[in-house]
Amino acid sequence: MDISRFRTFFASALASVALTAGCLAAATAASGAGQSVRVRGIVVSLSGDQLQVKSREGQPLTVTLTDGRVVSAVMRAQISDIKPGDFVGIASLSKSEGGDGALEVLIFPPALKGRGEGSYGWDLKPNSTMTNATVGETVKSVDGSVVTLNYHGQEKKISIPDGTPVVTLAPATLADVTPGTAVFIPAQKDVNGTLSSGQLIVGKNGVVPPM
């Protein structure tokens, strides 16, 4: 993939995916709108604004899509696409021998640089962490499959094992939300347990949202 050409294209399409960065911008927390919940699963059906999903835990869930919803797709990228100055989101786990090992890498488009900067708890796996930070510029190096990141004056090294999913984002539409499609949905759960969301990230062309 020509990542440079794609980034130029993505900048022109920013309006259609800008809200997507919010799904990686904070850890799960309660808010005035309800509890933040990350839904990972497979689309069962979509009827109007009612999205039926089978979660990764095997539970049937209904998510109400709010007005102005934004749909984005993940596109496959490579470790070699990560360049100094890129802003990335990396889910990772602490390793027994020390340091962190990546579970997945999202390369943000340049126009979204800085969104959700920081390192905080994540629920991809138990005890996992999400780090949104810049590669290069204020960091020491990118050395093979070990990336050194800087955020808010702090430094963190994360190793990226071979086979780790590396993706970036592309515009998509509700036409891409079809039965059998893998989805990642940052949703809100109200006091009655009802789920709603204005953002969806869908798998496309065989790429599954890894976050």
Image (cartoon, grey):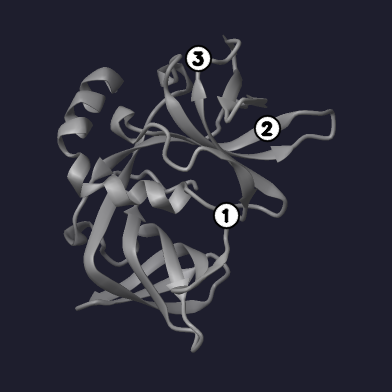
Q: Amino acid at mark 2?
A: Gly
* Relative to 54, residue 210 above or below: above
Asked whether disc 2 touches disc 3, contact meaning CB atoms under 8 Å apart, the reply is no
Q: Amino acid at mark 1?
A: Ala
The picture places residue 153, in percent across and down from the top left corner, at 61, 25
The picture places residue 164, in percent across and down from the top left corner, at 55, 33
Q: What is the number of the mark on residue 27?
A: 1
Q: As rendered, which of 35 and 39 lies closer to the eye?
A: 35
The residue at which mark 2 appears reads as: 101
The residue at which mark 3 appears reads as: 136
Residue at 28 percent of width and 46 percent of height: 18
Neighbours of disc 1 within 10 Å: few (<14), some (14-19), many (20+): some
Q: Is residue 5 left or right of residue 108?
A: left
Q: Nearer the viewer, mark 2 or mark 1?
A: 1
User: Earlier along the polypeptide chain: callout 2 or callout 1?
Assistant: 1
The picture places residue 162, in percent across and down from the top left corner, at 58, 25
User: Earlier along the polypeptide chain: callout 1 or callout 3?
Assistant: 1
Residue 92 position by quadrant: top right
Residue at 58 percent of width and 24 percent of height: 150
Per the model, the C-alpha gap separating discs 1 and 3 is: 25 Å
Neighbours of disc 2 within 10 Å: few (<14), some (14-19), many (20+): many
Q: Is residue 200 left or right of residue 172?
A: right
